[in-house]
Amino acid sequence: MKPDSKEKRLLAELLADEDLRESTLRGGLNAIRRKKIQRQSIRIGAVLSAMVLFILVSRNTERPSTSAKQQHAALQSPVPEVVPGTTVRVLKDQDLLDLFPDRAVALVGPPGKQKLILFEAVNN
Amino acid sequence: MDKSAANADRDGICDLTRRLAAGDEEAFRIFHAAYFDRLLRYVFVIARGDEEAAREAVQETMTRVVRYARPFDSAEAFWSWLTVLARSAVVDRGRRSQRYWRLIRNYALWWKPHQNEGRDDRETEDYLQQLLLDGLSTLEPVDRGLVQKKYLEGLAIREIALEVNLTERAVESRLLRARRQLREMLLKRLNDETRF
């Protein structure tokens, strides 16, 4: 860096005051410290965001697998429903219909009051 | 400047600006020591001798240097960038309440070719030096002699006092008065100026 000429040094002497020199130096150093704090905050924020995101993603991927496992377990060991106090098994609609594999059948009526209708072929 | 000196200068500015961009406090101290006076001279001219505006603009420029610092390959490019910051600080100060105009001005500054700033800088330096010489010529001959001996010839107060047959205290007092006169003359001439 080229040294200032004598005229420039005189101009600096005329124009500058030590308060301004000191305050601009202090102001700049404070700005650097603020910038550092900002950068650190951003870094910490980014790390925290990444952690939160990771937790959310891992939770979401765990949920479906758990319910799938439960469904699978339910299919593997079905517990038949029975009439309380008896060994009479309560059939579901599909179980009932499955009892007549070779016939035309239908369940008619509102839920709980359905009637099983068996159709027979009529030969003319 | 020979080639090795130019390389050293370039390496120096590369290193300094890189460290400034990285938020190195020591680099800022070096930058401040090297550029404060030059920036102040420049801003005084741009602010047309408005002392308050110049002070605020220098302060703001220093803050912007910290905020927007980036590496530069040459001292010229770095100084050119500094003048853009300084100019925008002066303009912002004048138009603080007019956001619309600031936006337009920022846009214009963004497009403005940087090489013009170097020419402006040389003009401002030459102009200030001319004003200084003019101001010296308006001082009383004794005071002018004292200022020249102290600042242009680099003599110590004691040497000057012996040479002009005055006490050291009297020399200091006359120098203080001469500096004030010169300063007032400079600010007034800058204020009257419409070139910048």
Image: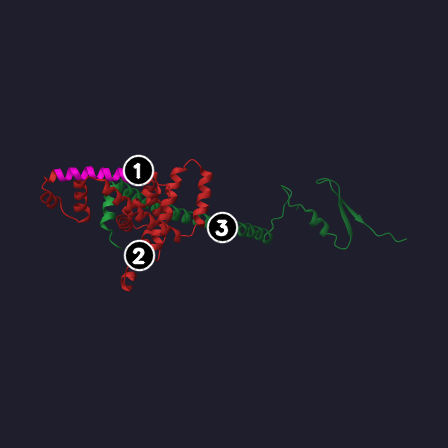
Q: Nearer the viewer, mark 1 or mark 2?
A: 1
**Residue B185 among those drawn in magenta:** yes
Q: Secondary structure at mark 3?
A: helix
Q: Are marks 3 and 2 on the same chain?
A: no
In which quarter of the view is residue B7 placed?
bottom left
What range is drawn magenta here? B170-188
Q: Colour of chain B?
A: red
Q: Nearer the viewer, mark 3 or mark 1?
A: 1
Kind of residue at disc 1? Lys
Q: Are marks 1 and 2 in contact (CB under 8 Å)?
A: no
Whole-Å distance between the Cαs marked 3 and 2? Answer: 44 Å
- Determine the residue positioned at 28% across, 44% down: B131
Q: Which mark is residue B28?
A: none
Decide which of A10, A45 is in the foreground and name it: A10
Q: Residues within 10 Å of mark 2 (few under 14, many from 20)?
A: some
Q: Callout 2: residue from which chain?
A: B
Separation of disc 3 and disc 1 at Cα? Answer: 68 Å
Q: Is residue B99 left or right of residue B130?
A: right
Query: Label 1 belongs to which residue?
Result: B188
x, y (%) of residue A117? 78, 46
- Where, quadrant-wise, is the N terminus of chain B in this rendering? bottom left
Residue at mark 2: B15
Residue that lies at the very extreme toward the bottom in this rendered image: B3
Task: Identify the hue of chain A.
Answer: green
Q: Which is in the foreground here, disc 3 or disc 2?
A: 2
Element class at badge 1: helix
Residue under numbered circle 3: A57
